[in-house]
Image (cartoon, grey):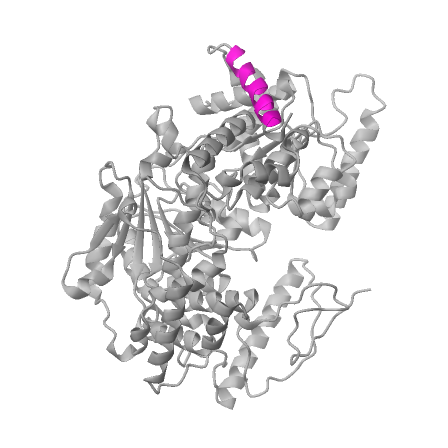
Amino acid sequence: MSYLQRLKAAAQFILSRDLDVEKSSPLDGAEFGVTASLKPHQVEGVLWLIRRYILGVNVILGDEMGLGKTLQALTFLSYLKVRQMSPGPFLVLCPLSVTDGWVSEIANFCPKLRVLRYVGDKEFRCSQRKTVYEHVKQQSSLLDAQSAFPFDVFLTTYDIALMDQDFLSQVPWHYAIIDEAQRLKNPSSVLYDVLEQRFVMPRRLLLTGTPIQNNLSELWALMHFCMPSVFGTSEQFLSTFKEAGDPSAGHDAVKVKEKFKTLKYILGAFMLRRTKSMLIECGTLELPPLTEITVMAPLVTLQKKVYMSILRRELSKLLAFSSGASNHQSLQNIVIQLRKACSHPYLFPGIEPEPYKEGEHLVQASGKLIILDKLLQKLHASGHRVLLFAQMTHTLDILQDFLELRGYTYERLDGSIRAEERFAAIRSFSHQSVKDTFNAQADQHGAFVFMISTRAGGVGLNLVAADTVIFYEQDWNPLVDKQALQRAHRIGQMNHVLSINLVTERTVEEVIMRRAERKLQLVHNVVGDYDMDKEGKTVGVEAGDLQSVIFGLHMFDPTDINVDNLKEVNTSDLSTMVEQVTEMRYEPLDSDGRKFVINPMDLLNGADFSIRTTSSIDFDPGLDEASYLSWVEKFKEASKLIDSPTIELRAQRNLPEEKHMKLEAARKKAEEKKLAKWEALGYQSLAVKGPACPMVGDIMPDSGSVQFVYGDCTDPSKVCPSEPAIIFRRS
C-alpha cells in the first residue's frame, strides 16, 4: 500500500464512523458540570472530539480564532472526568499571556475541574512540586483514593515544560492539550522533540487558529505530532502533495485541484476547521460585522530623506544582490532599516531634534503617525476603544510618547512585561461600563488604547472591550496579524468592528502587504472554504520571501530622490479621509465584502478618495530580476544628480558637554530609583554588568547593525573581524 493509499484508508475509516453517529445525539454540558451555554458549533465540536477520542485518534481543533476553542476543550475534559470516570491528569500547555484566561474559563464554566497553574519563579515552582509530591504520597496509602493528584488540569507554559521536563516527563498524562499549537510547526525545535520523545502523553489535542501559516511542511509537523504512525515522514508527505504546496510552479491545473481535494479529504478526518464566515453564512453563529480597511500613508519629507539615505548607503549591497554576492543577513538588515523609516524616523538615533522633548514634531515626522493622530481624535470623540498593534518595542515607545502627548489613557503589553503586569493590564482594559459603553459622554472605565506588540499579545487574548483594531506595523506573516485581529472580533463582541491597516505607499511596506496576500492564498486553498474557480487563478507561497521584497523595491520611483519637490496632503484633507474611514464601519455588507483600500494621496490631484475592494486590486507586484536591475540603474543615476549628503543614521545625538552630564545624571537617578523599587519588591537582577567603557566620539551603532553570533561561544562565527567580542562564561 502506497503512502497516499494509507492516508486515504485511514481517513475513510475515521469518516465512516461519523456517518454511523445519529444526527440527534444530545449533549448536555450540565450533566458533567459545564455551566456555559454552548453555541451549536461548539456542541458539534465537543461531539467530534468525543468521537475521535473513542476511536483513539489524536486531532487538531483548527477553528478560526474567536470561536471558543478553549471552552470546547474544557467541556471535553469535563466529559472525560465525569462520563469516562477519568480524573486525569490532564496537561495543558499554552503561552504565558493566556494562562489567566484558561484559569478564568475553568472557574466560570467548568468549576468541577480542579486546576493547578504551574507558573512562577524557580522557588515557587519547587514548592508546588513538593505539594504535589506530598499529596501523591498521602493518597497512595489510601485504598479509596479518587485521584493520586491534587488537580485535574495541570496548566503551564511551553518554556516551563522545557525547564522542568525532568519532573513533568515522569507524569503519565491521560490527555494533553497544546494551545496555540503553531509553536510546534518546526519539527526540529527543542520543544517538539522534548514533547514527542520524553513526555508520556499518548492522547493529544492541538488547538490552533492557523493550522497552516507558511507551507505544507508546517502542516505535516502538526499532523505528525498527532498521529506519527499515519503521517510518516516529511519527505513522504511533501512529495505526495508537492503540487498543492506550490500550485504556481507550473503544474497541471487539473492535477493541482485534484491534490487539493484529496488533501482536504484526508485533513477532514483529523482536523475540524470552522471559520466565522462559514458559520455566519449557515446561520449557526451571529457576530457583529467586521470591516477591514488599508490606509496608504504617505512618506513625509523627513521620512523620504531617511528612506533615500538608506538606499543610497546600501546601494552596493543592492547591486550585489542580483549576482548572488550579497548575503541573506545584510539584505534582511536593509529591509528592517527601510521598515523603520516607514514607521518613524526617530527610530534612528540622531534624527530627533533638540531639546528631545515631546511635541508636535513627534507627530509631523511620520505620515503614519499623522493619520493615526487624526483617527484617534475621531475614535475618542465617538467613544470607541482601540487595540494598537506594532512589531517593534521601540515603535511602541514612540507611540507611548505620542499617547502621553495627546493625554490619552492607555495600557501596554509587550515581551518585556512581567506576567502579573500583563494580566493586570488585560483586566484593567477589559473592565468597562455595561451601559453606554460607546457613548462619548459616558464615563469610560478602562484605557482608551491598548498598545500591544503583535508577537507578544497577538494570540489567545480576549479583548472584546475594543471595537477598533489598528495595525501600525505589519508582521511578515499575515496570519499573525489575522490572529491579532481576532482579539476583538470574536464571540462576546457586541459592536461593529473596524480594522485599519496603516501601510506606507510605494515602499517596502506595500511590497510586504502584496506578498502577504499571496501567502494567504495557500491557507485558503488547503484548509479554507476557498473556491479556486471563484478567483480564476491560484497563487502559491513564493520561494524566497526576502527575494520578493528586495525585487519589489522597484515600486519606489528613483526620480523621487529629489525630496524638495514633495507634495504632502494637508490637514483638512486628512480629516475628510478619517471621517470616511470611521463611517465605513457601518457600511452595509455587499457582494464585494468588507475589505477596502484607501489612498489619501489621490487628493493631491483633486480627485476623490480611491476606495477599492481588495478583489479589484492586483496583488501581483510583478517581481522579476530585470525590473529590479533596471530600477537599480535608474536609482544610481538619480543619486548622481543631487549633492545632498547621506543622512548619518548611526550617529548619536551630538550633545554639548553640560547637557550630556545632565542627561547622564538623570539616567543614573532613574537607574537608582528602579533598583530601589526592585529591592523593595524583593526582586534581584542576575544580569552580568559589562565593563564601563566611555563612548568614543559619542557614536553608538544603531541596533539594526548588531552583529549576530551563531554557534559555539568558544568558536563564534559570523562576527565582524574588525569588531572585538567579549564572552562571559558562567561556571
Q: Is residue 263 left or right of residue 570?
A: right
Taking the view exactly as shown, the residue that stands out farthest to the left is: 606
User: Residue 487 in magenta?
Assistant: no
Q: Main secondary structure of the magenta part?
A: helix
Which residue appears at 71% of the width and 46% of the height? 162
Which of 237/406 is in front? 237
* Viewer can see residue 400: no
Q: Is residue 67 above or below residue 647?
A: above
* Viewer can see residue 421: yes
Image quarter of residue 510: bottom left
User: Residue 18 in magenta?
Assistant: yes
Which of 228/631 is in front? 631
Which residue appears at 40% of the width and 81% of the height? 354
Find the magenta span and give its range: 5-21
Which residue appears at 70% of the width and 50% of the height? 121
Query: Residue 297: x and y, percent?
Result: 31, 61
